[in-house]
Image: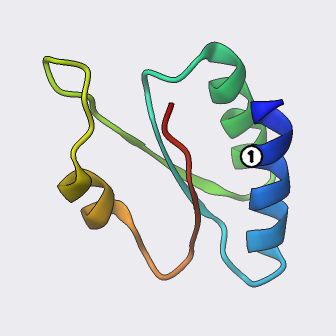
Amino acid sequence: MDNQAIITAAKLGESKGKKHIISTAFEHHAVLHTLDALKKQGFEVTLLDIGEYGLVTAEQVKNAIREDTCLVTLS
């Protein structure tokens, strides 16, 4: 189900010229596989590092957002 939401959001973003997605390297493998498939379709994916406590900060997300970001997906 998460995969379909990611694909749908990515395609909606693509229709507006936005092809950048932000996530983390710590996502479930199914999400990472979906992101890999989107990369093969021309999307750029930024995977944020998680800290020693397994957290991503709001500052990390803020700094990663670009004009062409269409999706931030963090589990």
User: Image check: 13 left or right of 51?
Assistant: right
39 versus 54 height, above or below = below
State the residue at coordinates (69%, 35%). 36
| Amino acid found under the numbered disc labelled 1 | Ile
User: Image check: 61 left or right of 35?
Assistant: left
> In the orientation shown, which residue stands out farthest toward the left?
52
State the residue at coordinates (85%, 55%). 8
Q: Quadrant of residue 70?
A: bottom right
57 versus 75 height, above or below = below
14 versus 49 height, above or below = below
Q: Quadrant of the N terminus?
A: top right
Position in image of residue 19 (x %, y %) = 66, 67
Residue in the foreground of this view, choosing between 46 and 54: 54
Residue in the foreground of this view, choosing between 69 and 39: 69
Callout 1 crowding tier (Cα within 10 Å): few <14, some 14–19, many ≥20? some
25 versus 22 height, above or below = above
Position in image of residue 57 (x %, y %) = 21, 45
User: Image check: 27 left or right of 36?
Assistant: left
Determine whether the residue tagged by mark 1 lies in a helix, strand or loop. Answer: helix
State the residue at coordinates (82%, 48%). 7
State the residue at coordinates (73%, 58%). 42
Residue indicated by mark 1:
6
